Image: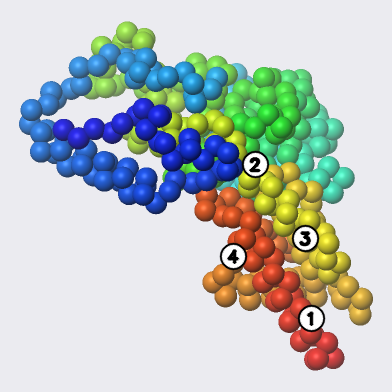
């Protein structure tokens, strides 16, 4: 039967490029790997009759085959962590749920609200705390403490706090350590949503964004967002897995088996909503084996450098402004209101027109958000094939289109 070589030295194209910075897999390697995968699948089906019904491996066998080098020490994820603290809050069944309160910044991903509702929390007790430019749109721990204290006085039980490292809208970073300290006062569960920016923390220079993470209860990151992994793949770490399994464990007779009864394996069915699951970890494992830590770090640094290049271009043109500080590889910018009585409404209209014209060209794509009641354009660097020339080309197109729009406005006056 065909085989898939898992020896890291087989990926020579990556290793040979060490001196040239990050490079994605070259097309010849991609073709070779796909051929091997197809051969493996085809040969498996041809020989399936000769294979045992159950594999003859023991729990943990795969870990022993992996080399320790290159493997260093959003809604469903959020949902399972939301149900974990219910026992500690003293809520047995649904009777105590109306008293439980959960907290997050208004910049938190929209799936947080969905997960809270699915877990049974009263929407009236879901606190979205406003943010502002004074904290770069991050959650203010002092304000969080004030809200949680008010809830206690009102007879509610602060149960869960979701902090974000790299919000979707603007890449704001909530102060992890300070938030954990506030939550500890009320014995509330702290979850860190690092879906996007968690990947950046494989680089030492970005790890300060996770300062205090040793005091949280859970953290999630999604390698499919920025770590070259196909959709979908989310990693969840939980400090006390028993808290999770106690809330989600099921043990029907038809699922009992010797491996589970031995205690030598982790029954992932007791850490998620469903029973079955796809082998998402295989995708991440292949990425790590293919590129290694050093190349993945180069990928992150290259994207950040290109984003900074774009940010510098924006700051160098007085027609534009960077609306929030850039933390990673996302630049939030807009055409600033200029002389001649341009209002915020006018600024939104001209920025929306810029976005729509750019997107119609098929040469670039901008998304938008609203930050502090301002319509903002979002330029994200993250594609494995993106190069500096693409960023320069996008900026030239933005510059040219903006000039056309402003000239049209002058001609119309």
Q: Which residue is mark 4?
A: 365
- Mark closer to the chain start, 2 or 1: 2
Disc 1 crowd rating (10 Å Cα; few below 14, some 14-19, many 20+) is few
User: Which mark is on residue 340?
Assistant: none
Q: Where residue 348 sits: x, y (%)?
A: 76, 70
Dot 3 or dot 4: first in sequence order is 3
Q: Is the residue marked by circle 4 packed among few (<14), some (14-19), or many (20+) residues within 10 Å?
A: some
Position of residue 345 relative to residue 82, above or below, is below
In front: 395, or 131? 395
Point out the image quarter for the N terminus: top left
Does residue 265 appear anywhere in the picture?
no
Taking the spot 68% from the left edge, 29% from the top edge, the residue there is 204
How has the structure been colored for display? rainbow
Can you say whether 329 is above or below 16 in the image?
Answer: below
Q: Foreground: 24 or 248?
A: 24
Label 4 near label 2: C-beta < 8 Å?
Answer: no
* Mark found first going from the N terminus, 4 or 1: 4
- How far apart are the alpha carbons under marks 3 and 2? 18 Å
**Judging from the image, what secondary structure is the residue with disc 4 in?**
loop
Q: Secondary structure at mark 3?
A: helix
Judge left or right: residue 83 versus residue 251.
Answer: right
Q: Nearer the viewer, residue 279 or 103?
A: 279
Q: Quadrant of the C terminus?
A: bottom right
Which residue is denoted by mark 3 in the rendering?
313
Position of 133 with respect to 73 (left or right) is right
Residue 236 percent across, percent down from the top left: 52, 29
- CA–CA distance between discs 3 and 4? 18 Å
């Amino acid at each position: 039967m065909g085989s898939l070589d898992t020896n890291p030295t087989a990926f020579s194209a990556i290793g040979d490029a060490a001196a040239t910075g990050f490079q994605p897999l070259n097309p010849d390697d991609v073709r070779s790997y796909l051929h091997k995968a197809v051969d493996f699948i085809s040969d498996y089906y041809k020989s399936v009759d000769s294979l045992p019904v159950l594999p003859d491996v023991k729990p943990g066998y795969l870990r022993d085959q992996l080399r320790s080098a290159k493997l260093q020490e959003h809604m469903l994820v959020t949902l399972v962590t939301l149900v974990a603290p219910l026992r500690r809050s003293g809520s047995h069944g649904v009777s105590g749920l109306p008293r439980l309160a959960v907290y997050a910044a208004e910049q938190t991903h929209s799936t947080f609200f969905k997960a809270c509702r699915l877990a049974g929390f009263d929407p009236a007790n879901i606190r979205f705390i406003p943010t502002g430019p004074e904290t770069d749109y991050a959650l203010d721990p002092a304000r969080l403490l004030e809200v949680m204290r008010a809830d206690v006085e009102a007879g509610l039980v602060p149960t869960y706090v979701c902090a974000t490292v790299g919000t979707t809208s603007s890449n704001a970073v909530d102060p992890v350590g300070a938030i954990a300290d506030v939550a500890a006062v009320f014995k509330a569960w702290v979850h860190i949503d690092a879906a996007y920016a968690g990947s950046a923390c494989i680089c030492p220079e970005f790890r300060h964004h996770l300062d205090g993470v040793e005091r949280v209860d859970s953290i999630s990151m999604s390698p499919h967002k920025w770590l070259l992994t196909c959709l979908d793949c989310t990693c969840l770490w939980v400090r006390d897995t028993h808290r999770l399994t106690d809330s989600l464990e099921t043990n029907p007779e038809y699922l009992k088996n010797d491996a589970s009864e031995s205690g030598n394996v982790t029954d992932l069915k007791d850490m998620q909503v469903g029973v079955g699951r796809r082998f998402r970890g295989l995708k991440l494992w292949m990425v790590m084996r293919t590129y290694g830590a050093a190349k993945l770090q180069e990928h992150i640094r290259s994207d950040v450098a290109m984003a900074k290049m774009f940010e510098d271009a924006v700051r160098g043109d007085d027609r534009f402004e960077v609306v929030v500080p850039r933390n990673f590889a996302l630049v939030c910018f807009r055409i600033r209101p200029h002389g001649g009585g341009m209002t915020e409404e006018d600024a939104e209209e001209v920025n929306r027109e810029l976005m729509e014209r750019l997107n119609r060209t098929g040469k670039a794509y901008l998304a938008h958000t609203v930050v502090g009641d301002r319509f903002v354009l979002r330029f994200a660097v993250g594609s494995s094939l993106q190069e500096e020339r693409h960023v320069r080309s996008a900026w030239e197109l933005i510059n040219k289109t903006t000039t056309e729009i402003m000239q049209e406005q002058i001609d119309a006056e």
